[in-house]
Image (cartoon, helix red, strand yellow):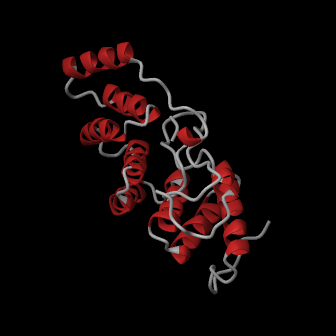
Amino acid sequence: MKSDAIAFGIAGILFGLIAGWIIGSQQVAPRPALTSGAPQPAAAPASQTTRAAVLDEAQVNALKSVAEREPQNAAPRAQLGNLYFDAERYEDAIKWYAEALKLSPDDVNVSTDLGVCYYYINKPDEALAQFAMSLKLDPKHAKTLLNLGIVKAFGKQDLPGATEAWQDVIRLAPGSPEAQAARRALDTLQSAHPGSMGTAQKPGP
């Protein structure tokens, strides 16, 4: 999966530094979702630097047939959500992710993917609410926490909230790629907005 503009003041490099991490959590290889030279809501989707995937209609139809035959199977619905997400058809992705989540309500990855979709259709409050549900399932889910920080920063202009979420990523998953992205985001945020981290301690190296 791959995962307007607002006058925000954080250098465009931030988006590149966290590329790939405001993305759905189901793909093994991270899809670049936040990369852009210009500020956009929560960061630009990858499609703005790389082309969106072409929707494979044959695969879509095959998965829809499976979903119709197997009304209690969440997997084809999640896969359909992934295909539509890759094609940047977020409304369609939301439909299928929501169906998958009804059948598999404990799937934190699908929940987070759904939240990312809400963000990309300019519904940051819904995105944050969905991330909250993800964190109820797994309070240490690194991609959710990283995405939470990004949406707070760029969707809600909540720099302290973003800082807290990114620091949580570093604290809970210190060796992860998400932690590396969070650290870079914090460094860039602090450089662009000195004092934005308040009294919180800046993470160490």
- Report the residue at 62% width, 68% height from top: 167
| Res. 174 visible in picture | no
Location of the C terminus (image quadrant):
bottom right
Q: Is residue 24 above or below residue 80?
A: below
Q: Is residue 104 above or below residue 116?
A: above
| Res. 146 visible in picture | yes
Q: Is residue 63 above or below residue 192?
A: above
Q: Residue furthest bottom?
A: 199
Is residue 92 rendered to the left or right of residue 29? left
Is residue 143 rendered to the left or right of residue 118? right
- Report the residue at 38% width, 16% height from top: 59
User: How many labels were placed on the picture?
Assistant: 0
Is residue 134 rendered to the left or right of residue 172? left
- Report the residue at 32% width, 14% height from top: 62
- Report the residue at 65% width, 60% height from top: 182
Residue 77: percent from left, percent from top: 31, 30
Is residue 192 rendered to the left or right of residue 46? right
Residue 145: percent from left, percent from top: 52, 59
Q: Quadrant of residue 82?
A: top left
Residue 95: percent from left, percent from top: 27, 38
Residue 50: percent from left, percent from top: 60, 35
In depth, the one of 148 and 91 nearer the eye is 91
Q: Residue furthest right?
A: 205
